[in-house]
Image: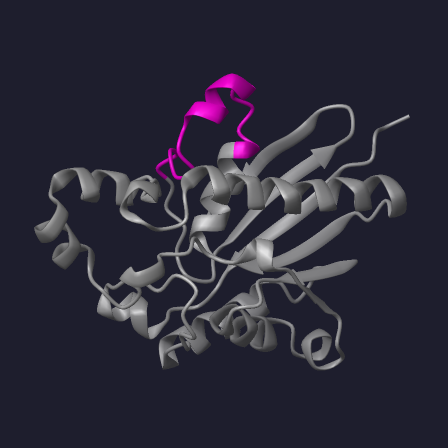
Amino acid sequence: MTERILKVYLIRHGQTTCNVGGVHQGWGPIRLTALGKEQAKRARDKLSGEIFEKYYCSDLLRTRQTAEIVFPEIYHGGGFIFDENLREIDTGAYFGRSPAELTSLFGAEYDRRRRIMDLGPYGTESSEHLKSRVRRFMKRLEADAEAHQPEKLAVVTHGGIIRTFALLASGLPEELVERLPAGALRLNIGNCTVSIFDYSKAKGWSIDSIGI
């Protein structure tokens, strides 16, 4: 008997005003740009033939706007499950400030840590906390997969969450994953791209594709 595989489609939000400005956006109430809305429409067209059993979304504004465009009937029908664990990494007081400005204040070590999402020493959400949030969400999907056996789920979220998800699903030894920062894998995840992950009870998580 072939084991059932759960496929999880993680969709990054469309371009935002902070993306354009090149500044930290964290948990801020950031809106999509006109291009971001167009990107979401293209994602809607790309996914139009897919059938999903459940829909999850970060509760931040930019992901809500993206979800509304990509899956309008589901969104307006109240079919989305909003989960705070899907929020982008919290950059705290650095919201709206540019990496260049902060590198000038804190030096090259800040810039190195920013690139791997390990800015806890500078007062932001720690890499360990971010990984724990993503693990909680993955455990939620695992429990749902075993209880209800869905085949395909849609998740509208953020680039940092997808990078962390990829690390946790990478198949690397657990002791190594524990030591690595959340953004250790250098991945290209553009706005409104789709990254697909597989889960089975026997084999756990694996990466199907990233940023397509």
Going by the image, does 3 lie left or right of 102? right
**Is 119 placed above or below 157 here?**
above
Going by the image, does 98 lie left or right of 153? left
Q: Where is residue 41 in the image (x, y as percent from the top left)?
A: 51, 74
Magenta part of the chain:
168-186
Q: Is residue 51 something one can see in this rendering?
A: no
**Is 65 placed above or below 149 here?**
below
* Rendered image coloring scheme: one colour
Which residue occupies 41% across, 50% down?
189
Residue 193, magenta (yes or no): no
Which residue occupies 59% across, 59% down?
84
Q: Position of residue 40 (x, y in %)?
A: 50, 71
Furthest-right residue in this view? 1
Residue 176, magenta (yes or no): yes
Going by the image, does 71 lie left or right of 107? right
**Location of residue 77 by image quarter:** bottom right
Quarter holding the N terminus is top right
Q: Which of 130 and 8 is in front in this view?
A: 130
Q: Is residue 36 something one can see in this rendering?
A: yes
Which residue occupies 57% across, 35% down?
207
Secondary structure mostly seen in magenta is loop
Q: Position of residue 43 (x, y in %)?
A: 53, 66
Which residue occupies 8% across, 52% down?
104
Q: Where is residue 33 in the image (x, y as percent from the top left)?
A: 37, 78
